[in-house]
Amino acid sequence: MMVGMATSGIFVITYVLGMEMVGPDYRHIAGTVCGYFEIIGYFGMALIAYYLSHDWRLMQVLLNF
C-alpha cells in the first residue's frame, strides 16, 4: 500500500525535475519522454510478472531493483 501511494508522488517529482532541466521550447518533448519511460516500466513489470508467475519470491526480488 505504501509503495502504491508513493509511486504517484515519485512520478510527479521526476516530471517536474525533467521540465526544469530543459528550456521552454523543449518542454513538450521532455514531458512526452518522461511519459514514455513510465509506460515502458509498466510494460516491463507486466512481462516480468507474466514470465515469473510461478515464483513470486523471485519476481519480488527482480521488481525491487
Image (tube, grey):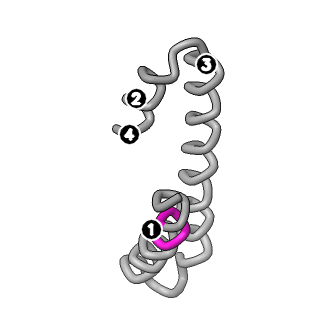
Q: Magenta includes 24?
A: no
Crowding at dot 3, Cα within 10 Å, few <14 / some 14-19 / many 20+, comes out as: few
In 3D space, how far apart are the residues under numbered discs 2 and 3 (Cα atoms)? 12 Å
Q: Tell me which residue sits at (43%, 69%) in the image.
A: 14
Identify the mark at residue 64; answer none if there is no mark.
Answer: 4
Does residue 59 appear left or right of residue 33 in this picture?
left
Identify the mark at residue 10; answer none if there is no mark.
Answer: 1
Q: Please state which of the two labelled residues, at mark 1 or mark 4, is closer to the viewer.
A: 4
The three-letter code of the residue at mark 2 reads Leu
In 3D space, how far apart are the residues under numbered discs 2 and 1 (Cα atoms)? 20 Å
Q: Please state which of the two labelled residues, at mark 2 or mark 3, is closer to the viewer.
A: 3
The three-letter code of the residue at mark 3 reads Ser
The three-letter code of the residue at mark 4 reads Asn
Asked whether the residues under the numbered discs 2 and 4 touch, taking CB atoms below 8 Å apart as contact, a structural biologist would say: yes
Q: Can you say whether 45 is above or below 18 in the image? A: above
The residue tagged with tag 3: helix, strand or loop? Answer: loop
In 3D space, how far apart are the residues under numbered discs 3 and 4 (Cα atoms)? 15 Å
**Magenta span covers which residues?**
6-10
